[in-house]
Image: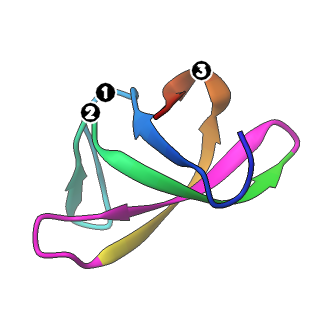
Amino acid sequence: MKIGDQAKLLKKTFMQNGVFILTNSNVEIVDMENDLYHVIYNDKEGHPHTLKNIRADELQKI
């Protein structure tokens, strides 16, 4: 996967900064560092949240 690709987040639902990040949500890859990805997650209201250090096995390209 490369920057700008869309992916599905396979990681189990978790909370980050008071926001639930849901399994199977669509995300956009914005950066890569040492086999870890930084992605943008848009919540139900459309607000973007940056998720850092997501492993490749936690993403599925769409």
| Mark 3, residue position | 57
Q: Where does the magenta region start and end? A: 34-47
Residue 18, image x, y percentages: 22, 65
Q: In this view, does 49 lie to the left or right of 20?
A: right
Q: What residue type is labelled 3?
A: Asp
**What residue sits 65% from the left and 29% below the top?**
56
Q: Residue extending furthest front?
A: 62
Mark 1 residue crowding within 10 angstroms, few (<14) / some (14–19) / many (20+): few
Q: Residue extending furthest top?
A: 57
Picture layout, residue 31 above or below residue 56 = below
- Look at discs 2 and 1 and give the one toward the viewer: 2
Mark 3 residue crowding within 10 angstroms, few (<14) / some (14–19) / many (20+): few
| Mark 2, residue position | 23
Whether label 2 touches label 1, CB < 8 Å: yes
Task: Tell me, yes or no, whether the highlighted magenta stretch contains residue 5.
Answer: no
Dot placed on the residue nearer the N-terminal end, 3 or 1? 1
Tag 3's secondary structure? helix
Dot placed on the residue nearer the N-terminal end, 3 or 2? 2
Residue 42, image x, y percentages: 29, 66
**What residue sits 11% from the left and 64% below the top?**
44
Q: In this view, does 22 lie to the left or right of 51?
A: left
**What residue sits 40% from the left and 36% below the top?**
8
Q: Residue extending furthest left?
A: 45
Dot placed on the residue nearer the N-terminal end, 2 or 1? 1
| Mark 1, residue position | 12
Distance between the alpha carbons at the discs numbered 2 and 1: 5 Å
Q: Residue extending furthest right?
A: 34
Judging depth in this view, the residue of 17 and 57 nearest the camera is 57
Picture layout, residue 16 above or below residue 59 = below
